[in-house]
Amino acid sequence: MSAAATVIQLAGIVLAPLLPGSIQSMKARLQGRHGASLLQPYRTLMRLWGKSAVDPEGTGPVYRIAPALVAACMLAAVAIVPIAGRAGALGLGDDALVLIGVLALSRFALAMAAWDTGNAFALMACARDLMIAVFGEALLVLAMLLVALPAHGTDLATMSSAAAGTQIWNGPAHWCGALAFALVILVETGRQPIDNPDTHLELTMIHEGPLLEYGGRDLALLTWAGAARHWVFIVLGAELYLPHPAGFAAGLLTLTASVAVLCCALAVAESAQAKMRILRVPALLGVGCAIAIAGAGMWIGGVGV
Amino acid sequence: MPLLAWAALAGVATLACGSILAATDRLRSGLMVQAAAMALLGVAGVAVLAGGQTIGAPFHSTVGLAFGLDPLSGLFLALLSFTAIPTLLFARDYLPGRPHAPAVGALTGVFLLSLAGVLAARDVVSFLVFWELMTLVPAAAILLAGRDREARSAVYAYIAITHLGGAGVWIALLALAHHGGIGDPAAMASAGTGAQTLVAVAALIGFGTKAGFIPLHSWLPRAHPVAPAHLSALMSGMMLKVALYGLIRVEFDWLGTTPRWLGLALLAVGLCSCLGGVLWALVQRDLKRLLAYSSIENVGIVALALGASLLFSGAGDRTWADIAFAAALLQITNHAVFKTLLFLGAGALDRATGSMDLDHLGGLLRRMPWTGGAFLVGGMAIAGLPPLNGFASEWLVLQSLVHVVIREPLGIALAGALALGGLAATAALALLCFAQMLGLTLLGVPRTQRCAQACDPPVGMRAAMAALALMCVALGLAPGLLLPTLAGLAPGAGAPVAALGAGLHVPGSGSYPTLGLALAIAALTGVLASARGKRRAAPSASWACGQPFVPALRWSSESFTKPLRLVLESILRPRRTIEVTHAGGMVQSVSYEGEVHSLLDRALYEPTVRTGLRAAALARRTQSGNVRTYAAYLLGLVMALLVLAQTGILG
């Protein structure tokens, strides 16, 4: 545990909207547009916070509590993700499987809200999100397994230390893990080719769908939660699946650089890729699972180490 | 005789009194006497478990009735008591007025007696007697409670499958007794691998049928939904667990050395059961059938943990064998609590709305806050969401599987990795399944008139559900307090697992701070929800592309699982028929019918039944009903025996 890591985790709560903001502005440049500034998400959040919320007819407390629960889960998730190989001191531990459970709770809260409104678009999007999550969660656990193997456990800080240095990149196992986790990032952050964050067509929405009915502060909480999801997965990807040194100060510098690289990569991927047919997504994730299992086999078999 | 034994005996006697009382038209007081009896048995069970002692007779292989309790039986007996008391309290208000209520009430007592009997039996004869009683009593109660065609065919399938599969229990136990192996692992270790394999396979099939492992599960989703709510709760909550108790006894306690293939077999069976169970659960429209299928899923998760424990103990890794075993027991405990809660909740919803069809419910959280609230807690627990109890045991099972991959050689590790991925997918499927179940029943707009007028049941039923919901929360917040005791129950347990507060902590691997996480999420949700403020714009209708939001636009169970059914078409094999009637070039009406049949029913059970019926038809040709033909058969038999005796084949 480390106080400095805790400070950066708390800063992450504020910095998280910067990630989708930077991806969007970079994407605009790549597509030859001017685009909004990096800080656009903050302006959006400020504007939404000043507006009043809307409750559709017939909705109850479940609909009203859901955004708060989603945001609370994402706050907990931000506090679980270690920074530069150091766990935070906020008392939530740093277990990979607990993190997966907390993310599942936020997904559940949103699905319940969708059922409470009865809105067909929200439910359609939730049904798709949960369907993709079936394969996404298997992929996430298997990708995590590839770093749990060298770390002998699911403690994220230990996993990050075990993945430090260049030794681990000698064998093919960690490359498989990195590939699998790249798919996880695409799924969980709702980026193309899995989902299109810029869509305004209800029929194609996945992550934006359940947000349709919400407005005002509710929407602000949910928008922040989406940004926090970027933070959790991009930081995790940088900590576990990109090369990094073992020390804290050097690790922090590498982390910053890695996060920037991953944001750029997402922007490039999104500009280069069209959205996939949704029924093709499970096959893609299935291939990811196969790669992860093959990687586990190679690690245990000692291939290339 | 020690005090505890007297308490247990008094419990049994009181239970018998309660059954008689229920049968003699004092239903309510009879059920309450049964609850008091279960409390006595529960005290005995908890005391034996906590004290780690043994009361009564030890296990023996000879003929002669013997009863006793050891800590493992104590755990299951305590579990039986903790789930049976709320169930009986529920039944007190639920049963009166239903068909043959006194007889069903009396049979409830006999059922509880037989469950406790299996747990306390210390010899083969009494074990098998109570085992068969445990199978037959619910069948009788289902037939009494509903005599329609569906109930009759369900009971027929139940008895046929559990008895065919149940032969395995007889073979396993009689073979064990033959080798003197009941309660004596050394005897089986010296009996040779042949005998060990026979016992291991027979027990896996026999107890597995009763526990609901796929592919021996087909009776479960038929029989559980047709029973009265409180019996469904006991069947899914406890009867399956008693079968797992038998499995644990034979495979872990008495087999001597455990072969590696057995651990792998349990992993395979567990993986099939948990994925298959939850997949078929989420395409059900009947709430109780959905819950029955999800029992198969949960039993599968237990099998995964048991398989991991066997693999670890085979490799001599005592610490992890104990942790995986504790994971299995914790999952058993949790499933007993939340499945009882969910079946009781389904009973209360059925009573209020008269329907178990998911597409005919809705909006019940506001109309039935007690039932709805408890149902919501149970649904979240079974979906494996933190900070409730389902997540705690799932976390421990996931940890065990991760360590199968980390610690075992390549082949087994790959099996572990497959199981790990499968369990993760199962958890996500369970989330989808129960989000749908809770959404369709509790949220949105009521779909029928009766649903709109539903109200909470009487106080006894409410209290029963509230107590079980509290148990879900408590077990979710402090599973760590139970962990050392459960790990200590593993046969041949090594150094005790250290207790480290309420949360779960696995040395050197990871920890799940239950209290911290629960407090953080609850506090943050509270703060953020209040920060949202009370300011509200005028209520508006839900967005439907500018159309008015009419009932035809509502989402149904079929629509929510549609993406998944499309993706898994090759496994689920959905069938659908769409009929469009035209009149004068205009579409007059469109009717749609869709259903998902169990793949195994078509691929495995239907051919078996067909072959069986064909064999029966052949055999029928020999049955002319003519006395002279039968006399000829007898004569022929005697002649054949004489010839055999003459030639010396009979010795």
Image: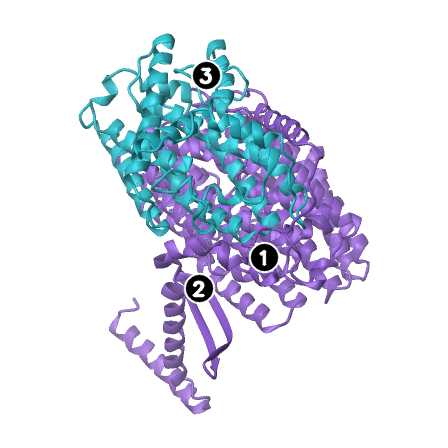
Chain colours: A cyan, B purple
The percent coordinates of residue B538 (x first, y second) are: 70, 44
Q: Is residue B33 above or below residue A76?
A: below
- Quarter holding the C terminus of chain B? bottom left
* Chain under disc 1: B
Q: Nearer the viewer, residue B378 or A73?
A: A73
Looking at the figure, which quarter contains the N terminus of chain B? top right
- Residue at 35% in and 35% down: A142
Which of the chains bears the disc numbered 3? A
* Residue A87, label in figure: 3
Chain letter behind tag 2: B
Task: Work out whether B170 lies above or below B619.
Answer: above
Other-residue count near label 1 (Cα within 10 Å), few / some / many at <14 / 14–19 / ≥20:
many
- Which disc number belongs to residue B288? 1
Mark 2 to mark 1 CA distance (whole Å): 16 Å
Amino acid marked by disc 3:
Ala
Q: Is residue B55 left or right of residue B559?
A: right
How many labels were placed on the picture? 3
